Image (tube, rainbow, N blue to C red):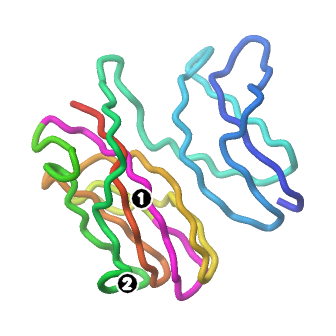
C-alpha cells in the first residue's frame, strides 16, 4: 500500500455494506498477514473491503464443520526460543500441542495459536502447518529485520499431535495456545 489503511472481511450480503470494523491494518509499503475467521454469506462467499488501494493475497486456511466445537483457553506459552536457540532461516521447528497447555490428549482437529516472530536476521515470513505434511505456499506472518510482530493462526494438528513452524529468516519464535477445535 502507498498509504495507511485497513481491510475488512465479512460474509457477503445482499446490500454489500462492510461492517464498521477492521480485520487487518497496514502502513505504507508494509506486507502484513492477518487471520480472519468469518461466516460465509450469499452463495458461499466472503467480501473484502480495502480502505485504500493495495494488493491482496487471500489464503483459505480451513473451515469449521457445522458440528465443530471451538474451545477457548487462557493463553498459555508453549514455545519461547528466546530462552534457547533461534530457529534457523529456511528451516522449521516441531511444536507438540496435543496434551499440553489445556489441549486434550485426544479428539482435537486444530489449535488456535498466537505466534510472535522477533529478532529476525532479515525480512521474511513464517508458515504454520500440520506436522507430517508439506509446507504450504502461504504465510501466517510477514516481518522486517528486527521487528517484533504477532498474528493468530488456526492450524490443523498432525497425526503425531504437533504442528510445524517454518521461517524464511533466522528468528526467535514465541507461541501461545489460545484454544482448539474438536473433531
**Position above or below: 111 against 131:** above
For the C terminus, the image quarter is top left
- Dominant secondary structure of the residues highlighted in magenta in the image: strand
x, y percentage for residue 111? 31, 45
From the viewer's side, name the closer residue of 28 and 147: 147
- At horizontal 32% and vertical 54% (from top left) the residue drawn is 76
Q: Secondary structure at mark 2?
A: loop
Tell me where residue 143 sits by quadrant. Answer: bottom right
Q: Residue furthest top?
A: 14
Q: Residue at x 29, y 72 (%)?
A: 93
* Quadrant assignment for the N terminus: bottom right
Which residue has dot 2 on it?
Answer: 86
Residue 170 position in % (x across, y down):
45, 84
Residue depicted at x 40% and y 45%:
154
* Horizontal arrangement in the rendering, residue 142 relative to residue 78 (left or right): right
**Residue 122 place in picture, x, y as percent:** 58, 85
Give yes or no for contact between labels 2 and 1 (Cβ–Cβ under 8 Å).
Answer: no
Q: Nearer the viewer, mark 2 or mark 1?
A: 2
- Between 55 and 175, the one lying in front of the other is 175
Q: Which residues are magenta?
A: 107-126
The answer to if 118 sits in the magenta stretch is: yes
Give the image location of residue 161, x and y in percent.
Answer: 16, 52
> Within 10 Å of the Cα at label 2, are there few (<14), some (14-19), or many (20+) other Cα atoms?
some
- What residue is pinned by disc 1? 136
* Residue at x 24% of width, y 68% of height: 94
Which image quarter: residue 11? top right
Q: Which mark is residue 117?
A: none
Q: Residues within 10 Å of mark 1 (few under 14, many from 20)?
A: few
Amino acid at each position: 500500500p502507498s498509504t495507511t489503511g485497513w481491510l475488512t472481511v465479512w460474509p457477503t450480503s445482499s446490500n454489500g455494506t462492510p461492517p464498521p470494523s477492521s480485520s487487518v491494518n497496514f502502513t505504507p509499503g508494509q506486507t502484513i498477514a492477518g487471520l480472519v475467521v468469518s461466516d460465509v454469506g450469499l452463495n458461499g462467499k466472503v467480501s473484502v473491503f480495502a480502505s485504500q488501494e493495495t494488493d491482496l493475497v487471500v489464503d483459505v486456511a480451513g473451515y469449521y464443520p457445522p458440528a465443530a466445537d471451538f474451545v477457548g483457553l487462557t493463553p498459555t506459552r508453549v514455545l519461547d526460543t528466546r530462552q534457547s536457540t533461534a530457529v534457523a532461516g529456511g528451516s522449521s521447528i516441531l511444536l507438540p500441542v496435543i496434551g499440553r497447555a489445556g489441549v486434550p490428549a485426544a479428539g482435537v482437529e486444530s489449535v488456535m495459536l498466537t505466534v510472535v516472530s522477533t529478532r529476525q536476521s532479515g525480512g521474511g515470513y513464517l508458515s504454520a502447518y500440520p506436522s507430517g505434511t508439506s509446507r504450504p505456499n502461504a504465510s501466517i506472518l510477514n516481518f522486517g529485520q528486527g521487528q517484533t510482530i504477532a498474528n493468530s493462526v488456526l492450524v490443523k494438528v498432525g497425526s503425531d499431535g504437533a504442528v510445524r513452524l517454518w521461517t524464511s529468516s533466522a528468528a526467535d519464535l514465541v507461541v501461545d495456545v489460545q484454544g482448539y477445535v474438536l473433531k
